[in-house]
Amino acid sequence: MAGRYELTDEEYELLKALLPPERPNRQGRPWMPHRQGLNGRFWVLRTGAPCRDMPERYGN
């Protein structure tokens, strides 16, 4: 179940085709999962809170 301000499974499936492939084995800083990153951005946009106040479950 999606939390408040998070993408539902249906919404994420629609967006998934538009995102680049997740590449966990690339060099450099590893990517966070796309869904986690999107949910974090949406949380900031919908709450109006600064990024530094974002819950830890969304990453840095």
Image (tube, rainbow, N blue to C red):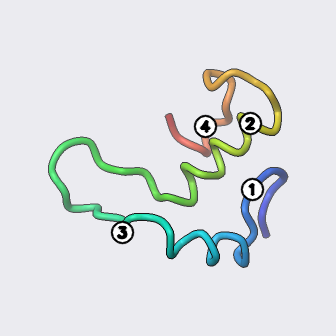
Asked whether the residues under the numbered discs 4 and 2 touch, taking CB atoms below 8 Å apart as contact, a structural biologist would say no
* Badge nearest the viewer, 4 or 2: 2
Can you give x and y, in whole percent of width and height, for residue 13 in the image?
62, 77
The residue furthest front is 18
Q: Residue at x 72, y 62 (%)?
A: 7
Query: Who comes first in sequence, dot 1 or dot 3?
Result: 1
Residue of label 2: 45
Can you give x and y, in whole percent of width and height, for residue 46 in the image?
81, 39
Can you give x and y, in whole percent of width and height, for residue 4 in the image?
84, 52
Can you give x and y, in whole percent of width and height, for residue 56 in the image?
60, 37
Residue of label 1: 6
| Mark-to-mark CA distance, 4 and 2 | 16 Å
Query: Who comes first in sequence, dot 3 or dot 2?
Result: 3
For label 2, the SS is helix
- Left or right for 56, reference 30: right
Mark 2 closeness class: few <14, some 14–19, many ≥20 residues within 10 Å: few
For label 1, the SS is loop
- Choose top left, top right, bottom left or bottom right for residue 47: top right
**Tag shown at residue 21:** 3
Q: Residue at x 67, y 31 (%)?
A: 54
**Tag shown at residue 56:** 4
Give the residue type that dot 3 points to: Pro
* Badge nearest the viewer, 4 or 1: 1
Give the residue type that dot 1 points to: Glu
- Left or right for 48, reference 17: right
| Mark-to-mark CA distance, 1 and 3 | 21 Å
- Choose top left, top right, bottom left or bottom right for residue 42: top right
